[in-house]
Amino acid sequence: MWDEFDPDDRAPGYVYSRVADHLASVIESQNMAPGSMLPGERALASMLGVSIGTVRRAAEELRQRNIVVTLPAKGTFVARRPGG
């Protein structure tokens, strides 16, 4: 699920954007309800094989898409499902 991302894939686009798309896909395919908590930044970086900075940039993109909301010292949560 979370770790099915290949950072070495030569797909077009920035890695953070591909990570954001992957996370949005996981949120949708797992039917994660609004309010569901995503794994922490360090855990996601480790699972996905990318840097914490890449995960942070991907989370920022998801916030801009209104898919997640981040609460300082609490975590990142699903705001709404993609396409929903």
Image (cartoon, rainbow, N blue to C red):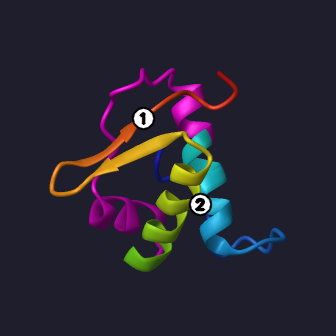
Find disc 1 in the rendering and name its residue.
78
Q: For marks 1 and 2, give the CA distance.
A: 16 Å
Image-based side of 14 in relation to 29, left or right: right
The quarter of the image holding the C terminus is top right
Where residue 1 appears, as percent x and y from the top left, is: 49, 41
Image-based side of 65 in relation to 35, left or right: right
Q: Is residue 69 above or below residue 34?
A: below
> Is 37 one of the magenta-colored residues?
yes
Image-based side of 57 in relation to 6, left or right: left
Q: Is residue 66 above or below residue 46?
A: above
Magenta range: 25-51
Where residue 9 appears, as percent x and y from the top left, is: 72, 70
Q: Residue at x 59, y 60 (%)?
A: 19
Mark 2, residues whose alpha carbon is within 10 Å: few (<14), some, or many (≥20)?
Answer: many
Find disc 2 in the rendering and name its residue.
19
Q: Residue furthest right?
A: 12
Where residue 46 appears, as percent x and y from the top left, is: 35, 67
Q: Is residue 19 above or below residue 22?
A: below
Q: Are marks 1 and 2 in contact (CB under 8 Å)?
A: no
Closest to the observer: 17 or 67? 67
Closest to the observer: 33 or 48? 33
Observer able to see residue 67 = yes
Secondary element at image label 1: strand
> Is 47 one of the magenta-colored residues?
yes
Q: Is residue 67 above or below residue 19?
A: above
Look at label 2 and name its amino acid: Val
Look at label 1 and name its amino acid: Val
